[in-house]
Amino acid sequence: MNRTLISHDNPKAAKSTSYGYLNGIHYLAPHTLSGRNLCPWAKNCIKICLNLSGKGVLDSVQQSRLAKSEAFQADPESYLAELSRQLSAMERKASAEGLKAAFRFNGTSDVSKERFKTLMERHPEVRWYDYTKSY
């Protein structure tokens, strides 16, 4: 997989630098062209979803999110292995810049954090956080 899976240029991610963190966010599409949802609420609130806010309105951004979502669902093991490699690179970059690494799984999806459990175990120094609409 030759695709960047972690975004650092989002204004929210960039703001965290002043607090001592290199913040990465993982943006997937909340639903895919094959009809699989990565957000349990995609059918109910897709018209007001953050997926289409900011640069999310750009076709290139939507295509990237859809491609990542399809790759994640087609071969989760390989996808997560690549995400782990990119997290390692993010940790090295954070260290070189005198920052701590922080990572949010769901920028525009709502995948259960249990799907990312192995990543959290492999990267214990990362500050993990998430967003969910789930109770």
Image (cartoon, helix red, strand yellow):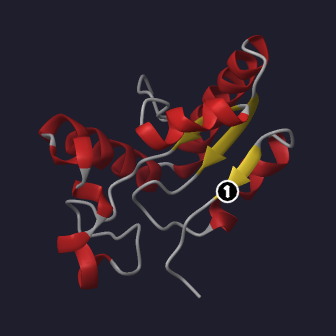
Neighbour class for label 1 at 10 Å: few (<14), some, many (≥20)? Answer: few
> From where the camera sits, is residue 22 visible?
no
- With 93 as the anchor, is 48 left or right in this view? left
Residue 86: where, in percent of width, then height?
61, 27
Of 52 and 43, nearer the camera is 52
User: Residue drawn 42% across and 22% down?
Assistant: 2
User: Residue drawn 60% across and 43% down?
Assistant: 80
Extreme-top residue of the structure: 96
Residue 98: where, in percent of width, then height?
78, 17
> From where the camera sits, is residue 55 visible?
yes
Q: Quadrant of residue 73?
A: bottom left
Quadrant containing the N terminus in the rendered view: top left
Q: Is residue 75 above or below residue 135?
A: above
Q: Is residue 5 above or below residue 94?
A: below
- With 1 as the anchor, is 52 left or right in this view? left
Of 66 and 73, nearer the camera is 66
Disc 1 on helix, strand or loop? strand
Q: Quadrant of residue 113?
A: bottom right
Q: How many marks?
A: 1
- With 122 as the anchor, is 3 left or right in this view? left
Of 72 and 19, nearer the camera is 19
Q: Is residue 5 above or below residue 107?
A: above
Residue 127: where, in percent of width, then height?
76, 46
Please state which amino acid type lies under the numbered disc 1.
Answer: Tyr
Q: Quadrant of residue 49?
A: bottom left
Quadrant containing the C terminus in the rendered view: bottom right
Residue 110: where, in percent of width, then height?
48, 68
Q: Give the residue at mark 1.
A: 129
